[in-house]
Image: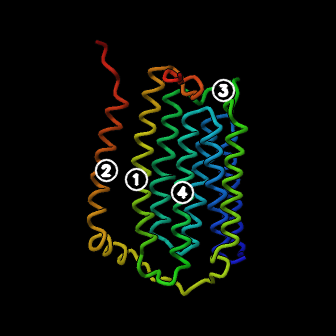
């Protein structure tokens, strides 16, 4: 097993765990953490491919991860603000109870 | 497969599993901070020092604190007796397992299994700064605009609604 395979498998596992958390947990905050974990797994892929590429001096992987971290930070801020707004409206962050649009 | 990578992988995987399975939301937030720290260690292990320290600064420093604040503001830290997982947890877990299986199978059969380690890349902070101010200056400006918009938007969304 080469080092690149190890990092890719770790990244795939983190993505799967984040996906499982986002799909199964009832708390909106944990769902948001799961989405953050999935973003981080993608970032780890970028860094691993950058490190093992033939032209690492191009810095493409690093730049992509820096911008992804910026976007993820903005997403976390807006997402948590939305959770606080939902809590104020429904008095709960349990996603199974926030179902006003359910048909 | 080196020993530092094994330690980092074990720590990150344990922390993520704890994040997704613990009952108390404050414990979940702390486990998530450990997981983000483990990822930062993986970046440092991959010779991406700048990204590793940015990860610590943004995720362990800011996002984890933001999550703890959200938990406290929504009283999520109080112990609950209701079910931890939603009613459709079997489907969700099955989807996650299938996704991991497909990804792992693809990785094992890809060109990555022949990829050997290359020479140490030369990515100093000076190079990164030069690239950010030269080739990537337009995306940098756009991300600045996005962060400003997100800041204002988050404040407006979380503002107390006025009684009409």
Question: Residues under labels 1 and 2: Cα distance?
Answer: 8 Å
Question: Residues under labels 4 and 1: Cα distance?
Answer: 12 Å
At label 3, counting other C-alpha atoms closer than 10 Å, the crowd grade (few under 14, some 14-19, many 20 or more) is: few
Q: Are marks 4 and 1 on the same chain?
A: yes
* Residue tagged 2: B146
**Chain ID at mark 3:** B
The circle on residue B30 is: none
Label 4–label 3 contact, CB within 8 A: no
Judged by depth in the image, the label closer to the viewer, 3 or 2, is 2
Q: Is residue A57 above or below residue A38?
A: below
* Residue tagged 3: B79
* Residue tagged 4: A40
Residue B106: quadrant of the picture: bottom right
Label 1–label 2 contact, CB within 8 A: yes
Judged by depth in the image, the label closer to the viewer, 4 or 3, is 4
Q: Is residue A77 above or below residue B99?
A: above
Q: Which sits earlier in the primary sequence, circle 3 or circle 2?
A: 3
At label 1, counting other C-alpha atoms closer than 10 Å, the crowd grade (few under 14, some 14-19, many 20 or more) is: some
Q: Position of residue B88 (x, y in %)?
A: 68, 33
Label 1–label 3 contact, CB within 8 A: no
Label 4–label 1 contact, CB within 8 A: no
Q: Secondary structure at mark 1?
A: helix
The circle on residue A71 is: 1
Colour pattern: rainbow
At label 2, counting other C-alpha atoms closer than 10 Å, the crowd grade (few under 14, some 14-19, many 20 or more) is: some
Label 3–label 2 contact, CB within 8 A: no
> Where, quadrant-wise, is the C terminus of chain B in this rendering?
top left
**Chain ID at mark 2:** B
């Amino acid at each position: 097993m080469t080092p690149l395979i190890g990092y890719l498998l770790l990244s795939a596992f983190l993505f799967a765990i984040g996906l499982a958390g986002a799909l199964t947990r009832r708390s909106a905050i944990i769902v948001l953490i799961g989405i953050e974990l999935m973003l981080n797994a993608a970032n780890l892929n970028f860094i691993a491919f950058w490190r093992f590429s033939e032209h690492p001096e191009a810095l493409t992987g690093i730049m992509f991860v820096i911008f992804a971290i910026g976007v993820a930070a903005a997403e976390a801020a807006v997402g948590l603000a939305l959770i606080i707004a939902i809590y104020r409206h429904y008095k709960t962050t349990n996603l199974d109870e926030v179902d006003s649009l359910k048909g | 497969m080196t020993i530092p990578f094994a330690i980092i992988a074990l720590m990150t995987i344990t922390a993520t599993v704890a994040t997704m399975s613990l009952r108390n939301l404050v414990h979940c937030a702390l486990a998530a901070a450990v997981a983000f720290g483990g990822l930062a260690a993986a970046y440092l292990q991959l010779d991406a020092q700048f990204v590793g320290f940015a990860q610590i600064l943004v995720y362990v420093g800011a996002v984890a604190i933001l999550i703890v604040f959200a938990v406290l503001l929504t009283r999520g830290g109080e112990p609950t007796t209701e079910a931890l997982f939603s009613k459709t947890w079997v489907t969700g877990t099955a989807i996650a397992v299938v996704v991991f299986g497909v990804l792992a199978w693809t990785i094992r059969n890809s060109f990555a299994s022949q990829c050997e380690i290359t020479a140490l890349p030369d990515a100093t902070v000076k190079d990164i700064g030069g690239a950010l101010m030269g080739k990537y200056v337009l995306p940098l400006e756009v991300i600045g605009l996005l962060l400003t918009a997100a800041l204002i938007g988050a404040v407006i969304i979380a503002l107390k609604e006025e009684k009409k």
